[in-house]
Amino acid sequence: MSISSIRLRPRLLVVDDEPMVLELIVTRLELGGYQCFFARDGFEALGRLHEVRPAGMILDINMPGLDGFGVLARMQADETLPPIPTMVLTARNQPQDVAKAIALGARDYLAKPFRDEQLLARVSRLIRKAPTTAPARGPKPVVI
């Protein structure tokens, strides 16, 4: 694979504290044509978001320190980050968890265990270009 083709692959940040699960997700996504970066907890994820500027993020909820909900909340509050399409990928599958993740800005929610085809299809949909009418962050400008 040439250097130019690596640059053209969409960048994804995968966040999970379980090493085997993290490796599995990264491997499947890389085989699907994505360039993957990873973080093992919520605090590391926030730093990596600023470094990598991914096209999308795959985020676990259950992590020590700062959990996935905390990451989503801090992303919304961080005006230096552009909106990053995020899919929650977690073993938690209660309706209130799904609702909370979506309310905090997640675009999609997939429960573990998952099928490879499911993951790849959902990630492809996740990182498609958002419509130009997407809501802007922060206060609306005042028109005089």
Image: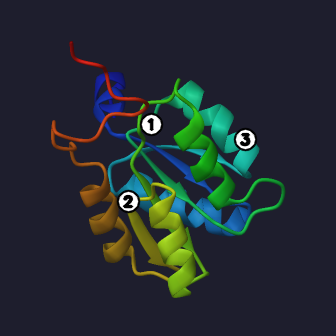
Inspect the image, locate mark 1, and give the three-letter code of the amino acid beneath it. Pro
Per the image, the residue denoted by label 2 is 107
Q: Most extreme residue toward the front, as rendered?
A: 144
Residue at 55 percent of width and 81 percent of height: 96
Q: Position of residue 70 (x, y in %)?
A: 68, 54
The answer to whether 130 appears left or right of 87 in the picture is left
Q: Where is residue 130 in the image (x, y as percent from the top left)?
A: 22, 44
Q: Most extreme residue toward the top, as rendered?
A: 144
Per the image, the residue denoted by label 1 is 54
36 shown above or below 50: below
Q: Quadrant of residue 65?
A: bottom right
Q: Nearer the viewer, residue 9 or 96?
A: 96
**How many numbered marks, from 0 up?**
3
Mark 3, other Cα within 10 Å: few <14 / some 14–19 / many ≥20: some
Q: Is mark 1 on a helix, strand or loop?
A: loop
Q: Using the numbered discs, state the Cα–Cα distance from disc 2 to disc 1 in whole angstroms.
A: 15 Å
The answer to whether 42 appears left or right of 115 in the picture is right
Per the image, the residue denoted by label 3 is 44
Q: Which of 33 and 78 is in front in this view?
A: 78
Q: Which of 6 and 64 is in front in this view?
A: 64
Image quarter hosting the N terminus: top left
Q: What element carries label 3?
A: helix
